[in-house]
Image: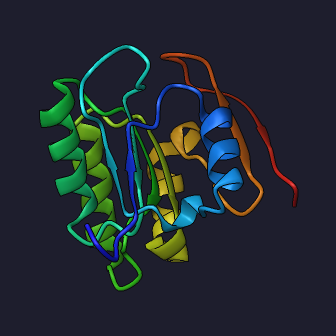
């Protein structure tokens, strides 16, 4: 996809992925799509979104079709800066109905979306930002965080 940033088969080790991206001079924030070429155990049911131009629900639905598994975590840009509170609440409900238990809206999601998702998801809301480190164990929720702020 000329002119686009696609992450192909990121593997199961987030720290190694980020170290490799740094080594290559690639900014993870510029990733627009994540592609899994096959389903196997090293890929957690997590969707990382770049800016969600097609819509975060469409991305979750497509990832579910590809993997054959429910997507339980969605993090990244949700492209919602112009969405109203009722639209955001409906989106939170739709994500929940699809099995999403943790969300981390960032980038182009907007502060209003962050507040609505925080209210809707409570402990399932993950605050993201520059320098934030999340640690996961396979099939677990966030185990620990580091927030430089």
Indicate whether 51 appears above or below 94.
below
Indicate whether 98 appears above or below 90.
above
**Left or right: 118 with respect to 144?**
left
Rendered residue at 30%/33% (across/down):
71
Rendered residue at 21%/28% (across/down):
67
The colour scheme used here is rainbow
Question: Could you tell me residue 32's position as x and y percent?
Answer: 38, 64
Rendered residue at 28%/58% (across/down):
56
Rendered image quadrant of residue 122: top right
Rendered image quadrant of residue 27: bottom right
- Judged from this view, the residue extending furthest toward the right is 148
Question: Could you tell me residue 29's position as x and y percent?
Answer: 55, 64
- Judged from this view, the residue extending furthest toward the left is 65
Quadrant, the N terminus: bottom left
**Left or right: 68 with respect to 50?**
left
Quadrant, the C terminus: bottom right
Question: Could you tell me residue 94's position as x and y percent?
Answer: 22, 49
Rendered image quadrant of residue 40: top left
Question: Could you tell me residue 123's position as x and y percent?
Answer: 58, 38
Q: Can residue 127 be seen in this snapshot? A: no
**Left or right: 81 with respect to 136?**
left
**Left or right: 66 with respect to 45?**
left
Rendered residue at 53%/16% (across/down):
138
């Amino acid at each position: 996809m000329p002119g686009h940033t696609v992450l192909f088969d990121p593997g199961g080790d987030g720290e190694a992925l980020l170290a490799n991206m740094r080594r290559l001079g690639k900014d993870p924030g510029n990733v627009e799509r994540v592609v899994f070429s096959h389903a196997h155990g090293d890929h957690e049911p997590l969707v990382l979104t770049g800016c969600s131009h097609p819509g975060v629900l469409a991305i979750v639905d497509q990832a579910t079709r590809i993997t054959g598994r429910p997507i339980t975590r969605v993090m990244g840009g949700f492209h919602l800066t112009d969405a109203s509170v009722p639209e955001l609440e409906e989106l939170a409900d739709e994500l929940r109905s699809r099995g999403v238990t943790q969300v981390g809206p960032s980038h182009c999601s907007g502060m209003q979306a962050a507040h609505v998702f925080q209210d809707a998801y409570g402990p399932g809301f993950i605050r993201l930002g520059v320098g934030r480190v999340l640690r996961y164990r396979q099939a677990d929720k966030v185990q620990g965080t580091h927030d430089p702020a």
